[in-house]
Image (cartoon, coloured by chain):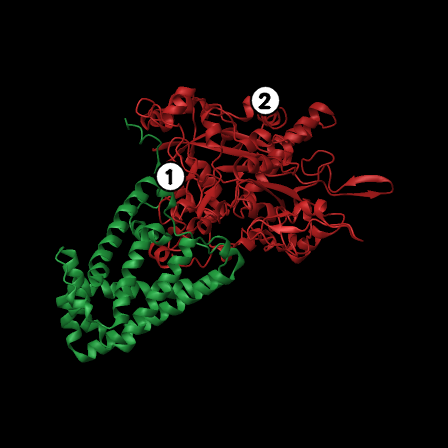
Amino acid sequence: MLDTVLFVAFPYVAVVLAIVVGVYRYFFDRYSFSSFSSQFLESRRLFWGSVPWHYGIVTILTIHLLAFLFPGAWGALTADPNRLYIIEVIGMAMALVAIVGIGLLLLRRSSDDRVRVVTTWADWALIAALFVQAILGFWVSFVYRWGSDWFLHTAVPWLYSLLIFQPKIEYVTALPAIVKWHHLWGFLIIALFPFTRLVHVLTFPITYLWRPIQVVIWNKGRPAQK
Amino acid sequence: MNIRAQVSMVFHLDKCIGCHTCSIACKNIWTDRKGTEYMWWNNVETKPGTGYPTRWEDQKKYKGGFEKKNGKLSLKLQGRTGALGNIFYNPNLPSMDDYYEPWTYDYGHLFDAPEGDDQPTARAISLVTGKVMDTIESGPNWDDDLGGSPVYAENDINLDELSEEEREQLSEVERMTFFYLPRICNHCANPGCVAACPAGALYKRGEDGIVLLSQEKCRAWRMCISGCPYKKTYFNWSTGKSEKCILCYPRIESGQPPACFHSCVGRIRYLGVLLYDADQIEKAASAEDADLVEAQRAMIQDPFDPAVIAAAKANGIPDNMITSAQKSPVYKFVKEWKIALPLHAEFRTLPMLFYVPPMMPVLAKSKDGIYEVDQSGSDGLAPLLSALDKARVPIKFMARLFSAGNTAIIEEVYRKLITVRIHRRSAEVKDVSQAELEKAYVSGKTNPEEADAIFRLTALPTYEERFVVPDMSRELAVEATVLPLANKQETGFGFRKKPERRF
């Protein structure tokens, strides 16, 4: 019963929260969408935290996502021990980079007077949750090696079963506790997502790559050209 | 021809007395909120001086504005992919310490302090952290009137090209001089902040060219602050959004000049419409350094030219905007008389705020009880005016500020301004010979009519002559932003929630 609550109900609740509240917030409180950068208040230490954290976690998340979206191709990739070895090393290295980054960010946020002033409870909850998740992830990969391969046969089918609304929790219930924590903590972050500044990931300004360099906007649309 | 209308500005520096009334008017209306305490959308700097934020003109450090790379115009800061790569950390962002940490005083302590041997003091309290600040290291107008000039004035980047001798002269006690440089957002035709914003939150308003920053779209990627070479976009550290001068557009829409213009004690400020050819923006912004001022003048079009009027109408510019452009004092100063120049044209953003450079005090010495002005009366100059190459502030310094280093342009401006003075002296004091007067008109490339017109608009302009705000009737003012029928019974203003952090 508890397993059903944790591995079926909780993920659905988290995702529904993220979508419903996120959409509501986007349409009714778009002003609140911001990365709330604190670089203006403290710049030097931000560099050593923010850069490794972001580049580390973006790489790690991309690997997670690719494996989930293309399990076949990923399986073929990890089938060769040499390639599996390289992927594991890259994954663990980037996880360490991310952990160092978020750790420094946490330290900075708690020790710098100016930055602490602009930190809300949601910020504390989020940064702590991310820190814990990064540690959990590294722990799993370190203690239970070759996760980039076995996760194709555990977490991926479980997530897929949730996606098609035919939940099959037996893929994950027998896993070691620390792995289960990593799964649940991921959904905790998804649940936190719409209530925190984490929404800024959705507004990554990719359109800057192709938009016209200068922007001119008419109040009521451009007047008719004659 | 792609004609656009731009509400533009002229600041006549000769008339600025450095009273900071403009700054206060602006602060009281727009930036007295939490997170904006340190912002001065309008500030007045002493020149020579390092300005606000400190050494903002140093683009080696701040990377503002545009540069020409292989003949192509690009942001000095970064390219498009560079912007996304630097999004986690902007290496060229000024920090609060480049401005100053805002503070208040613990006034209550003056009343509550227990009885003691000493007078109680009101200690400085940081408006950011709320903690006591032991030392205030910087503040608004920290180097006002050359205060601390060995540290501040000496480090003015515009002095870089001056010879050691010229620099020494500047700080000699009896030669020492300074002038004021009031600055607001230039509402550039090629704004660096707009180009740098990854989210596209900044935009130039089509109707009047005012550069605005959408608070709804801003995501605190903070590239605008670096992209603007004038450092006129600011980061609100409390709301996590950038903010900037809005040229008091609610006032402009209702026919009033912005608060800083209205309150200006020296009446140095002029506001009017310019019609310019938007197709020429790129060409004007990528001219050679020495030609930048001339290229920008060429971009501005004659509002009386039937072809320009026809093109403006074809672009949907309303008639009242065109008539405003015809009455514009800015057009006269910038294009007709050519005596108002953009600040730091070499940043290539085509600023639409122009400055009439200040005349400097004369150089004189007392000799045998007689007050003698250096080279007075020579070179087509009236008595009591010193020759240009003897100017108290080297012409090179002025050229660096107002004509992208081209001394010929700034000399031409000064010759005309001097001629206006000679012209008026001959009318008032009547001690200028006809021959000298004629010589002055030739040297200033002007004539009696123009000199009179410049004098009148400089010294005796009425409120209506200084501010030609395109009149917009109240009904139209509403229609400019909302459809009255579709939006009736609404609250009337866009924001219904407080602009503050909620998550």
Which residue lies under the disc numbered 2? Answer: B462
Residue A15 tag number: none
From the image, state the color of chain A: green
Pinpoint residue B415: horizontal percent, then vertical percent: 61, 37
Q: Quadrant of the C terminus of chain A?
A: top left
Residue B159 vertical position relative to residue A136 in the rendered view, above or below: above
Which residue lies under the disc numbered 1? Answer: B280
Camera sees residue B339: no
Residue A6 shown left or right of residue B338 in the figure: left
Camera sees residue A189: yes
Q: Secondary structure at mark 2?
A: loop
From the image, state the color of chain B: red
Circle 2 or circle 1, nearest the eye: 2
Residue B104 shown left or right of residue A81 in the figure: right
Within 10 angstroms of label 1, few (less than 14), some, or many (20 or more) residues? some
User: How many angstroms separate mark 2 from mark 1 (CA)?
Assistant: 34 Å
Residue B146 shown left or right of residue B66 in the figure: right
Q: Chain of mark 2?
A: B
